[in-house]
């Protein structure tokens, strides 16, 4: 017999009765606050088309979610059997029910992981499922979800409203026309879906397809990019366009936190080499390091909040990358150095309050050692929430534990769900709201701070901090 | 008056009553499961000789155990006074009772350490001692243990049975004749004691005595080792011999996790330089890095599980190494990089489910950052339990906390006691079983997972995972 | 209405009733033990002059305390508005009440930080303030503190006695005349205020003003420093002077833990280059690395305990350093390597029990990985308490968690308050005493160790360990 999903009302709180009581008290005050989602990867198309459908359960839950299939893959399930498309067009499983069956039979692999928690919440609250998926009940659950997915109230716009999302920021390449954002605006629908400027494809001169991306950037900006100067003008032009489309922030991702200020001449030399296909690995690293600093400069000019995600070694699995392409659950963190690496950037702009630089790390050893001391000093620097593998109950606890004493709450920015799985958004914010209520409850119970103070802090963490820091008010 | 050992029934569990209750419930289900010990350093001789005796209490507890004497040494007790033999033959303390007295007088130094916990358990459960050793009761305890050690039911084979050990794997050099394992087989005794193939002495070309080890390897394999090709054939031959003697696994230890694939030509050039005594430090590092990858290749061929222990700087104390030799409690961990270092190996074999590669680290900062993401993705990769200094209550808690959310339980392998102190084996597994029951209890109490699920997980952690992963079924 | 400070009697203890009960029991036994403060930065002048006054509240709490103003600065408050003097003499806020108002209005930024805890304790216990400072009650609190500060029982000597300080060690440059220490001695006042020898200004050949410091060292020692040999003689002379003034210890600070033994010739070459202003960055690093080893050698000769603080990147904020000078809250930790770095030093002196080397780190990832194994082995090595950013409730918990199982309690040295804020000393020691009582209570409740044992350990941690290790008995 299938097991029931549990979803206790007081889940994730410490078992100590007084801590739990205060945590619950705080949670109740923030549980129903609107969701502010300042950073994530939801596809804006789903809101542009009022009739957009998520497809079948596997197309919603499995195929697009590398959190899910990486774990199945680690235990020997083939990506082909999960319906993941191959680059060579070799046929993969296309029977939705078979794909779902694989998933359900291996659902136990997620025990104790955040994926389990999100799925449980989503299955129950969004799709009315009460059982833990397993081999036996797989098809029945498939049916139940499929039925819901076909209903009009399961169109993304309706869910957006039901989820009480106040604002959702997407992540969009520098060359995007933002046509979906335009369509949303023009549709008259009131949901606030804002673009975010992400220039990774054009600033990493060693990115696959970079030359083409530059051509596209030329086209989009109407600026013929022939040198470093025209390149930065094109970037500025696109930022300005994004801003006109209500973007509030930019984002970039790099493997290291290295920053460097190149002279215009140096930057131009590298850029020209890149245009001619002759840039070295070192050129690429230095150019990226320079463009990070440039991004800060531009943010001071145009007021866009600057997000920076550091430390992911992308596409670590060569075989999968070749066969399936990027984002196959094989992005692995690396150790990161911030103190020395950020100095060139911070020397230039760290004291400038016009800049809001939000840093994300995958190296938790830097929380207490480097990032909290930096954020607790530099006026321009803020610390993003626990990211990716650390967006979990333990990850949040470690973050609170290691960041807050030194950085202080007010140099952090609340939560980012950072997800492409739109229907999981309420689950993810709920975990954060519970985890932060629990942390604050612990402060009260141990006499570190008073109840009135943590009531304010709970609202800041759930709602006000992201809204204020991302200039979404 | 001497203090009593405590050994509460519910020891090591969280004090929260509900957590404790569930933990105790889980612990009761696994406490008496047979012990599976897939990796350790017990001397097989003790089972080959049915009349093997452990000697006197100091010969059992102190002299062979660097966990013990390192701590006494750190507080100024001389190794000579503990009866540790010097290489120069200079006389050391030989009075067993004096050695024991030093130990007992300094027993308080172990307060709060895992050594204290193991000793307490062992003294009580195996030797019927009720008091905490101190200067006053030292000799009385000595007598009590001595009497037991002389009894026939204190022969290793009898303890093996009493401890309910299902299988015990030893660690044996590539050049071992496995004569003790043969003798065990031939004796008709039913205890399952299996060898493990450890080629460290022959693959680290900078190891002291390497040239002699190669000669011995030639002799044992009957293959004249004159170049890289004959060397690998000899290795393969010995693996095959170990396998015929029921070995299930190999093991290797390196300072760094660096891997590299050399061409046959490069490997051969380095190997020949080594044979002529002209290999550089870099040669040694690259050759080791290459042999790690080779070891994976061979495991795919012969099905031996591959264990790899990374990150110990051996024999850090030059003076002690010179005076007493290796293993004097002076092996110190170093920071380790896995993400980039393992790529050459994983690019070759990480997707091959025929390989089971079990990784051990001494750098806990890599748990959540590198190892859990890697193990949660690559089909061939598993994570070994907390090792050495981290084989402790806090070490296990940190491991559960930092590994499980991302790797998932099923990419870990249960427990290794990794000990040469045979009578401490039940104590060590008991700590793991308690610690894992407690962790699982915490998951239930916080509503993360249901009771039926953790009941299954507890059995996996105590028994099934190591049996399955090490192919011991 | 202003909020009340909370200061529960049982604050900072775990909420579990039994843990709390035992922690409270232990805390009661140590709460009133005399304070031993073996390392800190209190200005000895305040005890030399019997009528020394702390000035106004902002001069006591804000202007000299970079813990305070770094946090205000991080949220956009200008240092000028806090009355921090500029190097260019540009006028800054001088109205004490306005400075205090800024502070009170931003007091909420400290929620959850150790600064909040110390201030709360100090305001309440030392200054009789009951309210949390905020914009509304700021001036009233200012008045209350001001009144106290004017009273004769608020002279530093009176507070020293009231705080029950048994001994307070200051930190003094190698070139100090120790005139304040002399004045204290000669005054007949019985308070024990001892100097500590800190030669950073003369051993870091790349320190600003180094050449002048060497001239001053020549003058103070009466030794004409013209080469490496005369330099070390001068150092030894100063150590001897400090010792004659009752110093018990030395201290040094370096960015890395690198040690190296230079030949006399190499050291002399570098030193001469430095005298001529031609030393390279590498010279400076190697010379420092060498002087660390020399410092150990000298300690063996003269018996001064050797303290070493590793891993702070000083004055990270170039703009603030230029405008305001050093110590502006912009010292940021860097990752540190100890295992390989310390080997040259430990090979020489690690086994010598005459040396007491106390290490401090800002890189917590080294606690369990490197420092606890090293301290749990080498007779000369001890581990200092959690330092700076880690001198906090969570920092202490992590330290106990990660250090004690491997190093054992007896290779640690109790607490250092390390503060220049004299009136905060009782608050800081109180946090340590509570945190250590709580840790020990947890050990008892989980059955790891018995009550009688932890009663002894609590006293060691609060009082005996620092007294014994720093040779203050």
Image (tube, coloured by chain):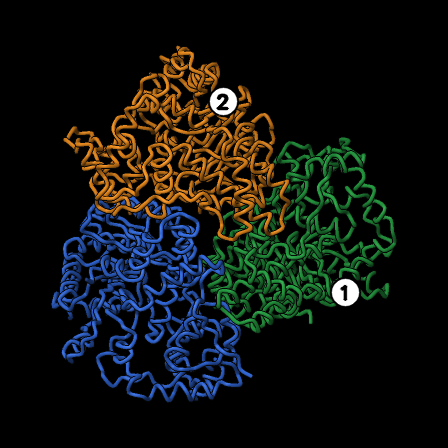
Chain colours: A green, B orange, C blue
Residue at 33% x, 32% y: name it.
B127
How would you rate the neighbour count of disc 2 (Cα within 10 Å): few for under 14, some for 14-19, many for 20 or more?
Answer: many
Disc 1 versus disc 2: distance between alpha carbons? 59 Å
Q: Quadrant of residue C271?
A: bottom left
Q: Element type at marker 2?
A: loop
User: Toward the viewer: B447 or A187?
Assistant: B447
x and y percentages locating residue B262 in the rendered image: 48, 28
Secondary structure state at the residue bearing disc 1: loop
Rendered location of residue A266, percent (x, y): 53, 57
Residue B369 seen from this side: no
Q: Residue at x 39, y 85 (%)?
A: C145
Q: In which chain is the residue bearing label 2? A: B
Observer-side mark, 1 or 2, equals 2
- Residue sitting nearer the eye, C371 or A17: A17
Give the residue displayed 19% in from the left and 54% down from the top.
C268
Q: Dividing the picture into quarters, in which one does residue A354 lie?
A: bottom right
Circle 1 marks a residue in which chain? Answer: A
Residue highlighted by disc 1: A192
Q: Position of residue C361 (x, y in %)?
A: 36, 56
Residue B113, placed above or below residue C102: above
The residue that disc 2 covers is B248
Of residues A404 and C77, the one nearer the viewer is: A404
Quarter containing the C terminus of chain B: top right
Q: Is residue A83 visible?
A: yes
């Amino acid at each position: 017999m299938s097991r029931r999903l549990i979803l206790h009302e007081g889940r994730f709180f410490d078992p100590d009765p007084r801590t739990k009581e205060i945590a619950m008290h705080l949670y109740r005050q923030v549980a129903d606050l609107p969701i502010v989602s300042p950073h994530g990867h939801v596809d804006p198309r789903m809101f542009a088309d009022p009739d957009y459908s998520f497809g079948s359960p596997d197309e919603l839950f499995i195929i697009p979610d590398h959190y899910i299939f990486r774990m199945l893959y680690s235990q020997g399930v083939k990506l082909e059997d999960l319906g993941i498309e191959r680059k060579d067009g070799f046929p993969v499983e296309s029977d939705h029910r078979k794909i779902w069956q694989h998933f359900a039979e291996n659902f136990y692999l997620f025990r104790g992981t955040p994926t389990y928690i999100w799925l449980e919440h989503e299955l129950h609250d969004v799709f009315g499922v009460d059982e833990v998926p397993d081999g036996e009940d797989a098809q029945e659950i498939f049916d139940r979800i499929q039925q819901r997915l076909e209903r009009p109230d399961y169109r993304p716009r309706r869910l957006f409203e039901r989820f009480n999302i106040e604002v959702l920021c997407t992540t969009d390449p520098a060359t995007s026309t933002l046509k979906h954002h335009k369509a949303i605006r023009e549709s008259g629908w009131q949901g606030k879906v804002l673009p975010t400027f992400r220039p990774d494809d054009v600033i990493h001169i060693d990115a696959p397809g970079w030359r083409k991306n530059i051509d596209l950037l030329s086209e989009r900006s109407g600026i013929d990019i022939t040198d470093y100067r025209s390149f930065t003008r094109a970037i500025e032009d696109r930022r300005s366009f994004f801003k006109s489309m209500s973007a509030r922030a930019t984002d970039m991702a790099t493997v290291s936190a290295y920053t460097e200020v190149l002279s215009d001449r140096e930057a131009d030399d590298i850029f020209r080499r890149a245009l001619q296909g002759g840039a070295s690995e070192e050129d690429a690293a230095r150019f990226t390091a320079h463009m990070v600093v440039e991004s800060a400069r531009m943010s001071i000019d145009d007021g866009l909040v600057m997000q920076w995600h550091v430390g992911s070694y992308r596409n670590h699995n060569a075989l999968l990358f070749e066969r399936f392409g990027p984002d196959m659950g094989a992005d692995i963190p690396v150790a990161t150095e911030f103190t020395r690496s950020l100095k060139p950037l911070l020397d230039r702009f760290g004291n400038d309050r016009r800049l809001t630089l939000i840093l994300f790390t995958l190296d938790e050893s830097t929380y207490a050692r480097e990032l909290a001391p930096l954020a607790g000093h530099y006026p321009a620097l803020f610390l993003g929430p626990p990211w990716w593998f650390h967006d979990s109950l333990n990850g949040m606890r470690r973050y609170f534990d290691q960041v807050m004493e030194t950085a202080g709450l007010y140099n952090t920015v609340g939560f980012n769900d950072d997800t492409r799985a739109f229907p999981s958004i309420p689950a993810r914010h709920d975990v954060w709201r519970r985890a932060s209520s629990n942390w604050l409850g612990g402060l009260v119970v141990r006499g570190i701070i008073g109840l009135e103070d943590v009531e304010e802090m709970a609202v800041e963490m759930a709602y006000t901090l992201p809204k204020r820091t991302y200039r979404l008010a």
